[in-house]
Amino acid sequence: MGKIPEHILNEIQDRCDIVEIISSYIPLRSAGRNFKALCPFHHEKTPSFVVSPDKQIYHCFGCNSGGNAFNFIKEYEKVDFIEAVQMLAEKSGVRLPEYKKEKKEDTSLVSAIYGINDIAATFYSDLLQRSHPSSDVWNYIAKRGFEENLIKRFKIGYADSSWSSFSDYLLKRGITREVALRSGLVIKGKENSFYDLFRGRLIFPIYDVRGKVLGFGARVLDNSLPKYINSSESIIYKKGKHLYGLNFAKTHIKEKGFAIISEGYLDVMTSHQYGIANTISSLGTALSVDQIRLLRRYTHNIVMVYDADQAGEMATLRGMDLFLEEGMNVKVVTLDKGHDPDSFIRKFGPRGFNEAVKKAKSLFEYKLDILNEKWDSSEPEGKAEIVKEMLSTIQRIRSAVIKAEYIKRLSQGLSVREDAVWEELKKIKKSHVRAEGFRLGGKAQSEKRKIEISPAEKILAKLMLEDVNVVNIVKDNLSPFDFKNPDIRHLVETLFTMDTEDNFIDATRLINYLEDKVAPHVISFIVNENMEIKNKDRNISDCIKTIKRGQRDKVLKDIQNRLSIAQENGYEDEAKNLLEEFNRLIKRGV
């Protein structure tokens, strides 16, 4: 459970519904008392992913992924247990106590670089505030129209033309050159000299979603090149895993129900200054899966804002297909030529920008318009190219209804028979399966978690989890060491010793309690497997006898081996004792 108290975990789970949590990521359909879906963790055609609202547990019977809400978030978002708890705590409004997260990396170095980043943010911010009001940097800020409160909120700074003012400052603060170099903000020159990464630039701190400084971007004050430079990636900063401005925008994104993604730092700042506070930036790179999954914590609806130069790039179009693969809804706004969000908002105001956002096109409409400009849709070859490109996007849509509607629109728009478009889609799917099927299918096979539990142990474990009285019956007849499967052994040992409230065992809480001893998918497998047990008492008795018989057979086999060795070596007394013990066990039976 790490450093988070059990009662906090319980409170979070009490406030969260696993069906609501999982359905925010993948579509679920009702199946009796449970819900089913295609498993998000392996490739399958028939749904084997089961979510139980009663037990607050999920399990996939195809790949044996399973557990509670924490386990789902951990596996889907590719985060550790602590981060999964933090995400659900934020969603449920539970305040977590302060703790130090254990890391595999050198925690002292991580802490040191965070510290250097905090020092740098303050250093550059103070330098800006101390600069003369008529200095180049303040003239640039005035030209951009940024207000003082916005500058302070984003903690914008200034690096003057000095070659080593910051690196010298770090040395005075007792930070070694070696650690300073690891931060990426200090560069080693010739003859063991050191100089600052940033000089003569406006500084933009880059934050994570919790407001911790990860790195920096920096812009020149004139038209010299390169216009922007960024601090290099470090042990704490990976460019493709973060979104600029998300720490400021996340609340507004939730309130408005969608996020606006622009390209640069200035776009974000101008948007926020004018009240369009659900705007973020991809840090100047094509969006990665990690960034999309980070954003998906707050919304499933995205509006991409492009200038006219970006709009027609095929790489841009194909990059947006990632949103569909991750179950996101994406729309696109193309601004007038010569405008980016910063300049557009300054010219037309927030009302004009919001009107442009309202007119945003779906990815289908946007891509079709671009392709119609690129290819001659009156020619068969042009139609074929447009269909090919459009189907590469449509086949990623999860909803069968939306997929069918888009195929209908595509066929009507191009005056092509609808069944011909469906036929082309089948070809793309087959090609996709050939190219990706081995990777996906292989992944499912190679990573399928093995669960090897005897029927008797499985039935007893299930009945014990459902009824405290069964725990007492089993405890009177068996010990934990009578169980062969190590996960079941640890589970039984815990059930034998734990205090239960109201004669009820909460399996989802048990998963947290046994996190380091029993794999969560083992408990979810036992709880969710549909076993028809008609005569409960008879089954309990038979299972106990089977396990006892298994233990007796194991002992008998051991005695036989030892007896054989004793007889071969002429140890008559030991052989006699072993034979007597063997006969005694046979007569006793089970």
Image (cartoon, rainbow, N blue to C red):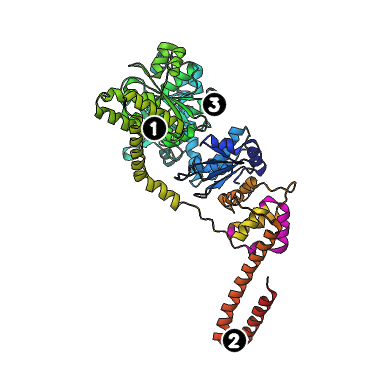
For the residue pair 587 and 264, the one nearer the viewer reads as 587
Residue drawn at x 45%, y 21% as measured from the top left: 269
| Residue type indicated by callout 2 | Tyr
Q: CA distance from mark 2 to mark 3?
A: 80 Å
Disc 3 + disc 1, Cβ < 8 Å:
no
Q: Secondary structure at mark 1?
A: helix
Confirm whether the magenta stretch covers residue 45: no
Q: Secondary structure at mark 2?
A: loop
Question: Residue 232, image x and y in percent?
Answer: 39, 35
Residue that badge 2 annotates: 571
Q: Is residue 567 left or right of residue 366?
A: right
Which of the 4 image quarters holds residue 546? bottom right
Question: Residue 332, image x and y in percent?
Answer: 40, 23
First reached walking from the N terminus: tag 3 or tag 1: 3
| Residue type indicated by callout 1 | Ile
Residue that badge 1 annotates: 394
Confirm whether the magenta stretch covers residue 470: yes
Residue that badge 3 annotates: 254
Disc 2 + disc 3, Cβ < 8 Å:
no
Q: Is residue 379 left or right of residue 255?
A: left
Extent of the magenta region:
465-486
Question: Residue 565, image x and y in percent?
Answer: 55, 82
